[in-house]
Image (spheres, rainbow, N blue to C red):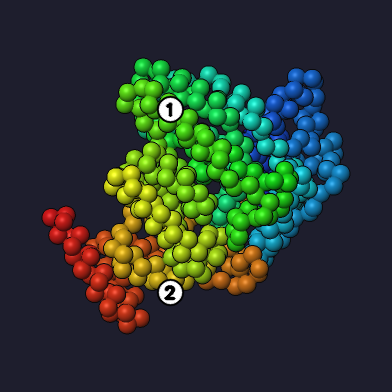
Amino acid sequence: MIGGLEASLRRLTHYDYVEDKIKKSILTDSKADILVHGMGELAVCEIAEKLSAGCTIDQLAGIPGTAYNLRKNSPAPEKFFELPSCRQILSDNKLFMQAHLEYQKRCFPEGEAVVQDQGAGRIAVMPPSRPLSEAEMDRLYSLPFTRETHPDCRKEGEVPALESVKFSITTHRGCFGGCSFCSIYFHQGKEISSRSEGNIIKELEKLSKRKDFKGTIQDIGGPTANMYAMKCRKQKICSRQSCIYPNICKHLDCSCEKLISLMKSVLRWKKAGRGRNAFVASGVRYDLAVKSDEYMRILCKEFVGGHLKVAPEHFSNNTLKYMGKPRFGLFEKFENKFNEESRKAGKEQYLVPYFISSHPGCTNEDAEKLTEHLVSKNIMPRQVQDFTPSPLSLSTAMFVSGIDKNCNKIFTAKGSSAKKLQFALLRYYEPKHFGIISKHLSRKRKFRLLEQIRKKADYQKKRKR
């Protein structure tokens, strides 16, 4: 049996960026009997129960949240959709997009199973497990996790990544943002599974009694911090990729009432002990945040430790369309509100914007527009991610197929020189990038922008001396 994030996202024929090739399902390549996709708790429990009852491997077929090999004694599900095969996709990469979209339409608990021929055999992928209930989330997060490095790993030294999560609290899982470059939709699902307020406060109290607790909860949130307790009013999961893009679904209950109640309870915990702090370090979805003045006030006054991460991702509305992100004007509205509430709280605080370069559909002209905006606002972003295709994201399907979800041909920066240019345009202030930027902007006769960038690069060079 295989599972976990990496196996989960490679459940179907997928693209491997490191090897630059389309590969079979990891279930086929690993020669495993069964693959658990998603977070896995319900599927693993059902597998364990069936094995304990004496079931064979073939009798595990059909469990929600799993994928399995089709054999004589483990037939295909009663109802399924056949995706383009691995061989077909290899001969026509546009079918990669078709396969992705067909699977996306069915990848929810009430959805349909899919079957795909891998060449070495066919596999069936069952719909995801249902989301955990609040009571199940509470039981899960009440388990006695040690928050320590595993003894076997400790022999090789401590795990640096542990420090950022050791004193952090997960309030919920799932994300209904549906960003094109993100695979959370396919792993955690888009329905939010939240813990109860009481259970979260209980964990805060437990952490504060640890000998190594220094008073600060580094992050309290989830994949998107401000989606806690939000839900569909119809209590039904549909096939729509995003509940908030291009517009907020009329059935989405995006009230911050329960989130604000939780934040106030955390504030009472903070005030009950000297030197206690709790911050929101996970990303905030700003198109939801601006809908509640009270949320913005409490967030800026009590839960920001000087910097808050946000992800506008780009400035060009053309690129944002392919990313599945709201127009940049909405980010500016959030920025103004953040600055206003920070001033009212008497705090000097800053937003840390995240940007992506070379996203499929982003032209060099789009990248230049972002550079012009950054230069005009004197913003020098550190958090710039060059687009890396990851399994089971819509953006990766665009990267591989060269088309968008409507089958329109798009530009994609491929190859080191094309990707380096767009990355350099976002990190324009670094002297090492000036050469490639100068060559490009001179050819475009954008001498005014080039001179502004030269001054920024010269200033940074002097600072380093």
Tag 2's secondary structure? helix
The C terminus lies in which quarter of the figure?
Answer: bottom left
Query: Which residue is tagged 1?
Result: 268
Residue 198's label in the rendered image is: none
Query: Which residue is tagged 2?
Result: 365
Vertical placement of 23 versus 416: above or below? Answer: above
What amino acid is found at the position of numbered circle 1 in the picture? Answer: Arg
Q: Are marks 2 and 1 in contact (CB under 8 Å)?
A: no
Residue 38 % position (x, y): 64, 39
- Can you tell which quarter of the image residue 210 is in? top left
Residue 172 % position (x, y): 56, 36
What amino acid is found at the position of numbered circle 2 in the picture? Answer: Glu
The N terminus lies in which quarter of the figure?
Answer: top right
Vertical placement of 22 versus 316: above or below? Answer: above
- The residue shown at (39%, 51%) is 338
Residue extending furthest right? 78
- The residue shown at (85%, 47%) is 79
Residue 114 % position (x, y): 76, 49
